[in-house]
Image: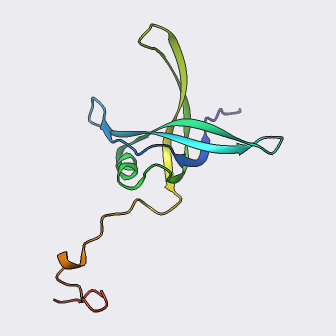
Amino acid sequence: MAYDQNEIIIIGRVTHDPDLKYSSSGTMYVRLNIVSNSKQGDGSEKANYFKVMVFGNRAENCYKYLQKGSQVCISGSMQMSDYEDENGKKIRSWIILSNHIQFLNKLKEQTPLEEEDNPLMDEEDAIPILGG
């Protein structure tokens, strides 16, 4: 007996900084838009855009470490949703429900301590002094 499989893997770049949100049940999530370029038969490139939902701890990590332009590898399943827009027009869209995300480049920079704010820094060569 053959089984159906709904699996997609995308490597691309985040198009905007993630925004952490909470569902009505309290689950953390982020919505990502990913752009992935593909080569066409004539050698030109085409940008493909994907909507991605990430939940739980993975969503929190996306919020903390990803920013616009970050490269990611996302795997998950495709889900179709139907809804009506504000004008009553029926809309059908596809979204990837992520079950795995891998950050492929340098993570978002954390704000470094200024030397004068860190009493354990040796002023001569900025090497941390352990033990005060």
Q: Is residue 82 above or below residue 99?
A: above
Q: Residue at x 53, y 52 (%)?
A: 72
- Judged from this view, the residue extending furthest toward the right is 42
Q: Is residue 97 above or below residue 106?
A: above
Between 118 and 107, the one nearer to me in the picture: 118
Location of the N terminus (image quadrant): top right
Residue 7 coordinates in the image, percent (x, y): 61, 39
Query: Looking at the rendering, which quadrant does residue 118 occupy?
Result: bottom left
Between 99 and 91, the one nearer to me in the picture: 91
Between 129 and 28, the one nearer to me in the picture: 129
Residue 13 coordinates in the image, percent (x, y): 54, 48
Horizontal side of residue 119 vs 51, given as left or right = left
State the scheme by which the image is colored: rainbow
Residue 26 coordinates in the image, percent (x, y): 26, 35
- Judged from this view, the residue extending furthest toward the bottom is 124
Q: Residue at x 36, y 39 (%)?
A: 29
Q: Residue at x 50, y 43 (%)?
A: 15
Q: Is residue 45 above or below residue 116?
A: above
Residue 63 coordinates in the image, percent (x, y): 36, 49
Total numbered labels placed on residues in the image: 0
Location of the C terminus (image quadrant): bottom left
